[in-house]
Amino acid sequence: MRNISRAVALLLACLPFLLMAQNLAGQLPTPGQNSILNLYDAFGYQKRGTILDWGFSALVHYNGKTILFDTGNNADKFEHNVKALGVDLNQVDIAVLSHRHYDHISGFDYMLKVKPAVKAYLPADPALGAPMHYTFSHDTKESLAGMPPEQLYFGGAVNSMDDYKPGDRFHGANQEFVPASREIAPGIYLIVTRSVMLGDFNAYPPNEPGHPDLAGFPELSLALKTEKGVVLITGCSHSKVEEIIRATKQYLGSSIELVEGGFHLFPYDAAYISNIAHLMKDDLGVRRVAPAHCTGNLAFKIFRDIYGENYNYAGLESEVMFTH
């Protein structure tokens, strides 16, 4: 009995060191450690009762701040996953929307229900209600001679508006549109890029009929400065993941420690994906990757093969750790 008691005492004495070693292996996060928790995705273990769905959301803990990045495709499913993972959205300090698509935006309805006053940063996208310059008339006053003011837009006084807001997706929210890359809190940056793959076409005059130009929508990525380099979180990378990385490096002048999120490579073949993976690793110097969401099944495999031990699984319920 005495030997058993000594063994138990020894185990209790060693337990903190065992836990520390386990944490160094990336298996057990310590309180206050920086991390990225995947709240919404179409792949994952589902050990904690979460629901798979197409979309993306991540909860980021960074130097005492809690950041919600995107909110998935369905508010009810987002709510379910949040509760299944034991997340308290009242603790969210900052909410960021990467871009306008519904598989990233829909859960904001639940987020704002829980904490209406949360500070929300949105792309400067007119589709979300960002103010824009809008010309509604090219007519000269001479061409409209004889028309009474009440029969003309704004009494005929102006032909355009500088602060036209075409909508208000988050009415009453504590929202701020971000037109250019900037720091929003110590060490926390939003990187602005513009989609070259998706957007809006306009074939009305003066555009050339039949050959409209693509007006790509703006996209926000979240960049966090750490002692090892920048941790970069992307939504869907419609601006191309390599271009988001380049924009981040140019703006912050720092190396990239980790890129997590959607790389949007599922439309591409193995040769294209392999080229992007090698470009990120060898030319752009991305040390770690944690692909999720729209990156694609084949891309998961290719990035895992190329990055080896520096590939981090990032499916639903996963928690990827990073340094302060």
Image: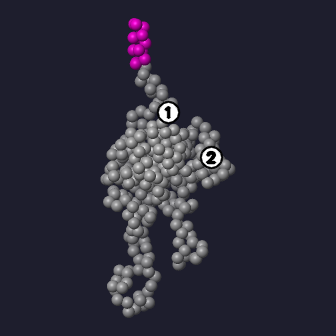
What amino acid type is highlighted by mark number 1?
A: Gly
For the question of whether residue 323 can be seen, the reply is: no
For the question of whether residue 48 can be seen, the reply is: yes
Residue at coordinates 63% horizontally, 49% vertically from top-left? 273
Task: Find the distance from the CA under tag 1 to the CA under tag 2.
Answer: 25 Å
Q: Position of residue 18 (x, y in %)?
A: 46, 23
Pick whichever, 253 or 144, lies toward us.
144
Element carrying mark 2 = helix
Q: Is residue 117 left or right of residue 134?
A: left
Magenta stretch secondary structure, dominant: helix
The quadrant of the picture occupied by the N terminus is top left
Q: Position of residue 213 (x, y in %)?
A: 56, 70
Q: In this view, does 5 lie to the left or right of 248?
A: left
Q: Is residue 198 magenta?
A: no
What amino acid type is highlighted by mark number 2?
A: Leu
Which mark sits nearer the N-terminus, 1 or 2?
Answer: 1
Q: Position of residue 136 (x, y in %)?
A: 43, 78
Disc 2 crowd rating (10 Å Cα; few below 14, some 14-19, many 20+) is some
Q: Give the range drawn in magenta.
A: 1-13
Q: Is residue 148 above or below residue 114?
A: below
- Give the foreground label among 1 and 2: 2
Task: Tell me if label 1 and label 2 are in contact, CB under 8 Å.
Answer: no
Residue at the extreme top = 2
Residue at coordinates 38% horizontally, 44% vertically from top-left? 66
List the residue tagged with mark 1.
26
Residue at coordinates 60% horizontally, 74% vertically from top-left? 210
List the residue tagged with mark 2.
298
Pick whichever, 275 or 297, lies toward us.
297
Q: Residue 152 carries which label?
A: none
The quadrant of the picture occupied by the C terminus is top left
Q: Is residue 5 magenta?
A: yes
